[in-house]
Amino acid sequence: MFTSLMLLAVAELGFRLALAWGLRKQYDRRLAIPDLLALVLLVLAGLPDWLSPIQFPFPVSFTLGAVLPDLLMRMI
């Protein structure tokens, strides 16, 4: 069985890939997030509420799904 964490990450990953494909096909643009910003977003999403310097509204799985394509494409 899939957990809600995995399902949310997969849903966001699919949305992100569809958005990137649509932008590339329609406008010939690439959707990319710098590595440092992606890591900062993941760290902010992973921090507990009492330790976070700013309130970050998205859970880790949503953030991971949003930045995972950029992090994987940098490694390939």
Image: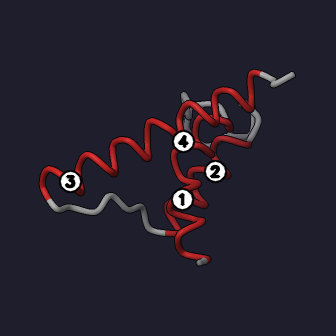
Image position, residue 4 (x, y; %): 75, 21
| Marks 1 and 2, how far apart at CA | 6 Å
Circle 2: residue type = Leu
Q: Give the residue number, with chain letter if any, for mark 2.
A: 42
Circles 1 and 2: CB atoms closer than 8 Å: yes
Q: Which residue is rendered at x = 24% and y = 57% of the image?
A: 24
Q: Which residue is rendered at x = 58% and y = 65% of the image?
A: 71
Which badge, 1 or 3, is on the more N-terminal residue? 3
Circle 4: element type? helix
Q: Give the residue number, with chain letter if any, for mark 1.
A: 38
Q: Is residue 62 left or right of residue 16?
A: right
Q: Is residue 42 left or right of residue 26?
A: right
| Marks 1 and 3, how far apart at CA | 24 Å
Circles 4 and 1: CB atoms closer than 8 Å: no
Q: Give the residue number, with chain letter if any, for mark 3.
A: 25
Closer to us: mark 2 or mark 3? 3
Circle 1: residue type = Ala
Q: Is residue 62 above or below residue 65?
A: above
Instruction: Tell me the number on the disc at residue 13.
Output: 4
| Marks 3 and 4, how far apart at CA | 18 Å
Please rate how many residues cluster around mark 3, counting C-alpha atoms within 10 Å: few if below 14, some from 14 to 19, many from 20. few
| Marks 2 and 3, how far apart at CA | 28 Å
Which badge, 3 or 4, is on the more N-terminal residue? 4
Circles 2 and 3: CB atoms closer than 8 Å: no
Q: Is residue 27 above or below residue 71?
A: above
Quarter of the view holding residue 54: top right
Quarter of the view holding residue 34: bottom left
Image position, residue 18 (x, y; %): 38, 41
Closer to us: mark 3 or mark 4? 3
Image position, residue 63 (x, y; %): 58, 41
Circle 4: residue type = Leu
Circle 1: element type? helix
